[in-house]
Image (cartoon, rainbow, N blue to C red):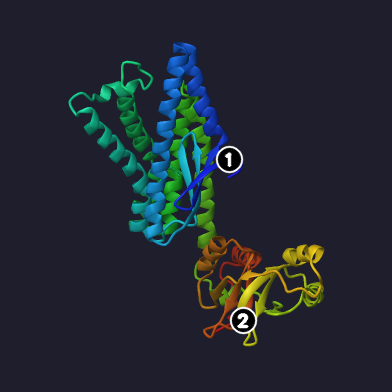
Amino acid sequence: MSWSLTIGRLFGVAIRVHITFVMFLVWIGLAAFHSRGAEAALESVVYIVLIFVCVIMHEFGHILVARRYGIETDEVTLLPIGGVASLHRMPDTPSRELAVAIAGPLVNLVIAAALVVAIGVSTFSPAGMEDLANPGLSMLERLAAANLILALFNLIPAFPMDGGRVLHALISLRTGDARATDIAATIGQACAFGLGLIGLFGYPILLFVAIFVYVAAAEEAKLSHVRQALAGLMVGEVMETEAMTIPLHATLKEAVDLLLATPQDDFPLVDAFGKPVAATTRSEIIAALRSQDPQAPLPSRPAATIRAVETADKALQALSDARVGALCVIDAEGVFVGLLPRQALAEAMMIRAAQPSWRFRRKVT
Ligand code: ZN
């Protein structure tokens, strides 16, 4: 996410802070200074840093549960509404989606419970939660209250908040994924309107949350429609079969000669058996040409491959997981049979939209 800066790493995940989160913290600090002076402002800053730590722990609740299901995460971005962990994908079964989504708010509930026990159950009163800045409350009491609010707020049933995911998982247990996304996105947008209305009547920060939620819900619905448009299609039906390959040990000069003969952007590097073992791109070849001898070996990275018999939906997932422009399509023996750039999936969707019953040529059986 842009407008963010990295402040550290934990479990191999970058922790980033969005500019709006910083503004939110400054706003709270200034408000405390204005009303109660420097000492109160310092105390507020300490309190804010502690909340900040709780938000990070919330995100790592999601991240570590997702990791159990083999889903990695690159970064966590902190926003005024909490944090956003950029999981490579969401789990594909409703029960796993539910587990990942609920893990974050559960972390806050556990922190709140632990703090309440530390304070002494009898002295903690939820009534104090009405005013987090109440100087009559101890830091621990306010922190317990903040964690309760974090948990409840994130459980509002609207994308991209955890409650939206929980709702989506629960609906898809009954209706299947595509329908569930439509329903959950609609409920999410209704919640966004509600939040926006409350925002108009005195909680301006909620207006930002409402806009954020509205846009995210629309994004989610769009992705679901892409999935539906690709449903039932196989990689072998939509791949490009005329793709050019480059021999594994070709030099830069040889690659440039091939590159000039085709408009292709992604090139598989194949071994003597026709198996794609590495891949390179047009721009990587050109960049290497600027700094290296034409007889030098090609710049390359491991090839991202997919079987021709896999579904187009899975290819879409693989493309975003591998963060590449194209997948090398292979047969059962691992031999290169075609290339699947993002463009090929987009074309398949356009053909489907124009002719819903179009029969794609089965290129690989
Ligand atoms: Zn969360």
The reply, left or right, for residue 295 in relation to residue 8 is right
Q: Position of residue 234 (x, y in %)?
A: 53, 74
Judge whether 103 appears above or below 33 on screen: below
Is residue 321 visible in the rendered structure shown here? yes
Q: Earlier in the sequence, mark 1 or mark 2?
A: 1
Q: Amino acid at mark 2?
A: Val
CB within 8 Å, label 1 to label 2 = no
Please, is residue 362 above or below residue 141 in the view?
A: below
Res 165 seen here = no
Q: Which residue is mark 2?
A: 337
Could you say which quadrant of the image residue 179 lies in?
A: bottom left
State the SS at label 2. strand
Quote the CA–CA distance across marks 1 and 2: 41 Å
Quick one: quadrant of the C terminus? bottom right
Q: Nearer the viewer, residue 245 or 173?
A: 245
Residue where numbered disc 1 is placed: 4
Q: How many marks?
A: 2
Q: Residue furthest left?
A: 122
- Comparing labels 1 and 2, the label whose residue is closer to the camera: 1
Q: Please state the horizontal and vertical placement of residue 295, each as a whole percent of the image.
A: 80, 75
Q: Which disc, if any, is residue 268?
A: none
**Residue 192 x %, y %:** 47, 36
Residue type at tag 1:
Ser
Q: Viewer-proximal residue, 290 or 82?
A: 290
For residue 358, what is the image quadrant?
Answer: bottom right
Image coords of residue 172 (percent x, y): 37, 56
The crowding category of the residue bearing disc 1, from other C-alpha atoms within 10 Å (few below 14, some 14 to 19, many at least 20), is some
243 or 139, which lies in front? 139
Please give the name of the residue rendered at 51% of the width and 28% of the height, measured from the top-left corner: 24
